[in-house]
Image (cartoon, rainbow, N blue to C red):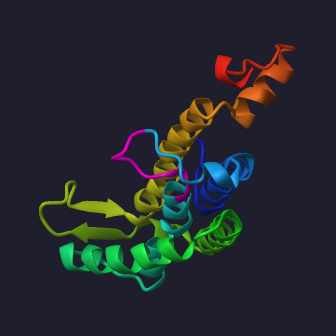
């Protein structure tokens, strides 16, 4: 049977964050205000969101909080909004992505199997109403990959070929497929 525990989760998140940092570095600062549509986050907002999105997990699991409700998430939403606003430049965002990513993975690596198996409950209307700490921590990786997919599409919209695509093309000897607007 395959074992996927704290060490593997930390390494998996470290890889995901490394790829997010590369995207943050590849996108020019003058494009950090770009929005694919008016109602979605800008590049800067999305990257700042990712940089701050793991802090609540470190707090909840580090303090062994066993139940979360709407009041908790409401208070956290205000705190995170302030943190995100403070990340005003590309340099701020990239540094926060690196620092917070390492803080999160270092935290995960210290957790034992018992801690990962503990159950956290959620007040209605959250469903499911119970999750293990492991599942909650894994959701941070899933969340980041979701937004990274959006960022890779944004890279295409601004005329860039995402680094993972460039690497795959290089492995197979394919020319870079730059969008027509970038040629």
Query: Which residue is rendered at x = 55% and y = 44% of the image?
Result: 148
Q: Quadrant of residue 180?
A: top right
In the image, the segment drawn in magenta is: 37-44
Rendering coords of residue 168 (x, y %): 77, 24
**Nearest the camera: 173 or 36?**
36
Left or right side of 107 for 82 = left
Q: Tell me the quarter of the image containing the C terminus.
A: top right
User: In this orientation, does residue 67 appear?
Assistant: no
Q: Quadrant of residue 9?
A: bottom right
Q: Is residue 38 magenta?
A: yes
Chief SS of the magenta region: loop
Rendering coords of residue 107 (x, y %): 60, 74
Q: Residue furthest left?
A: 124
**Nearest the camera: 14 or 77?**
77
**Nearest the camera: 166 or 7?**
166
Query: Which residue is rendered at x = 31% and y = 78% of the image?
Result: 66
Left or right side of 58 for 135 = left
Query: Which residue is rendered at x = 45% and y = 81% of the image?
Result: 59
Q: Is residue 149 magenta?
A: no
Q: Quadrant of residue 109?
A: bottom right
Left or right side of 118 for 86 = right
**Nearest the camera: 183 or 161?**
183
Rendering coords of residue 73 (x, y %): 28, 73
Query: Which residue is rendered at x = 51% and y = 69% of the image?
Result: 52
Rendering coords of residue 26 (x, y %): 74, 46
Q: Give the number of callouts.
A: 0
In the image, residue 157 sits, relative to residue 44, either above or below, namely above
Q: Tell me the quarter of the image containing the N terminus.
A: top right
């Amino acid at each position: 049977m395959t074992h996927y525990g704290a060490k593997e989760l930390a390494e998996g998140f470290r890889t995901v964050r490394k790829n997010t940092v590369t995207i943050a570095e590849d996108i020019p600062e003058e494009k950090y205000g770009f929005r694919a549509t008016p109602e979605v986050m800008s590049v800067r907002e999305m990257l700042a969101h990712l940089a701050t999105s793991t802090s609540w997990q470190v707090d909840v699991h580090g303090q062994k909080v066993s139940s979360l409700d709407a009041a908790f998430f409401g208070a956290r939403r205000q705190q995170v909004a302030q943190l995100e606003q403070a990340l005003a430049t590309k340099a701020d965002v990239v540094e926060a992505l690196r620092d917070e990513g390492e803080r999160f993975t270092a935290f995960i690596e210290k957790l034992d199997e018992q801690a990962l198996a503990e159950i956290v409950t959620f007040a209605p209307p959250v469903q499911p109403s119970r999750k293990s700490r492991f599942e909650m921590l894994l959701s941070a990786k899933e969340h980041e990959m979701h937004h990274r997919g959006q960022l890779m599409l944004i890279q295409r919209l601004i005329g860039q070929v995402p680094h993972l695509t460039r690497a795959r093309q290089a492995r197979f000897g394919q020319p870079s497929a730059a969008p027509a607007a970038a040629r």
